[in-house]
Image (cartoon, rainbow, N blue to C red):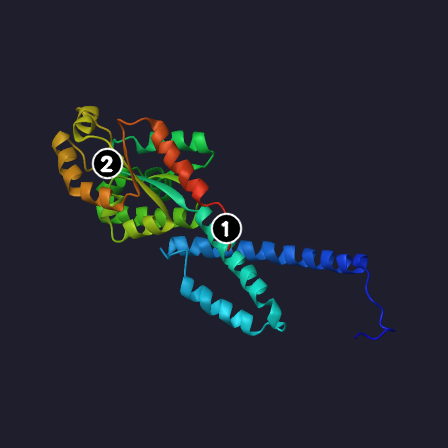
Amino acid sequence: MSDTNEKIPTIQDLRKEIDALDAELLALFERRLFIAEQIGSIKRKQALPIEDKQREKQILFKKLKNLEVGGYKKYAEHFFNSLFAISKALQQDMQNFYLIGMPLSGKSALAKQLSQATGIAYIDTDNEVTKKVNMSISEIFENEGEEKFREYERQVLEEIAYEGKLIVATGGGVLTYKDNARLLKASGKCIFIDKPIKELQEYFGHKDLGRPLIRDAQDIEKLYYERIISYRTTADMIYSTNEPFTKLLAYVHDCIRSNNLPKIN
């Protein structure tokens, strides 16, 4: 029984206190999301997984151990699980869409179309490399060699992974260098733009397109069979250029929707 002389707070008093606490919580929550977003950027750049259930369990155990009112435990557990889920959803929402595939398969054009249809910015790794070193791809190959080009390309990929939420047209040989495939898979979805080899050869013809590894139709065939397995095994989705663009767009939209906030039991 409470002391009769003790003043019992009114609902208005308690609601005023809750409003003040909510303002503090919102500011802290905003800061927490900002930090979670930064952590997500580092995870993408370092090809680390978004989810670490074991770490979540350890954090939850430590926090609940310090709870003063034992009867609040199930509510506190729900609260922290909600925070974990929101942080993961935020980090997933920042993943990229990487278009992989052979040179001349139309990755750059499709990236632009996807960007226009979704409102997500697009970027072309070859263009970023040339801007980075102020040389054309052919000049880099001629002056510094393919290995140096791949190093520049990797640097660009890490910057793109860190930035997040981009549609990325990659170079045809992006999967040939070190663990680029792991970096792409960890920081986004990989879409293989599958253009038939005969169409690639017909498109090439005898034109000089400034592709240092492609001098004739035979080079296309050689590269195709060297890379096709990597493209297919890395891809989260395979899109044939003979299929309607709406299929590709639907996949991207499905991925975006799947990053909505999950339900917490």
Q: Is residue 234 above or below residue 199?
A: below
User: Which residue occupies the foreground of this view, 148 or 177?
Assistant: 177
User: Which residue occupies the foreground of this view, 134 or 225?
Assistant: 225
Left or right, 166 with reference to 242: right
SS for dot 1: loop
Res. 165 in view: no
User: Which residue occupies the foreground of this view, 142 or 72?
Assistant: 72
- Residue 193: x and y in percent read 28, 35
Of label 1 and label 2, which has the lower sequence position?
A: 2
Q: Is residue 59 above or below residue 51?
A: below
SS for dot 2: loop
> Could you tell me how many numbered marks the image carries?
2
Q: Which quarter of the rendered picture does the N terminus lie within?
A: bottom right
Q: Residue at x 18, y 34 (%)?
A: 214
Furthest-front residue in this view: 1
Left or right, 96 with reference to 21: left
How crowded is the residue under tag 1: few (<14 C-alpha within 10 Å), some, or many (20+)? few
Q: Which mark is residue 177?
A: none
Q: Residue at x 54, y 60 (%)?
A: 78
How crowded is the residue under tag 2: few (<14 C-alpha within 10 Å), some, or many (20+)? many
Residue type for callout 1: Lys
Res. 264 in view: yes
Left or right, 178 with reference to 259: left
Q: Residue at x 54, y 54 (%)?
A: 34
- Residue 134: x and y in percent read 35, 40
Q: Is residue 220 above or below residue 66?
A: above
Residue type for callout 2: Met
Give the residue pinned by disc 2: 102
- Residue 208: x and y in percent read 21, 27
Marks 1/2: CA–CA distance: 40 Å
Furthest-right residue in this view: 5
Give the residue pinned by disc 1: 263
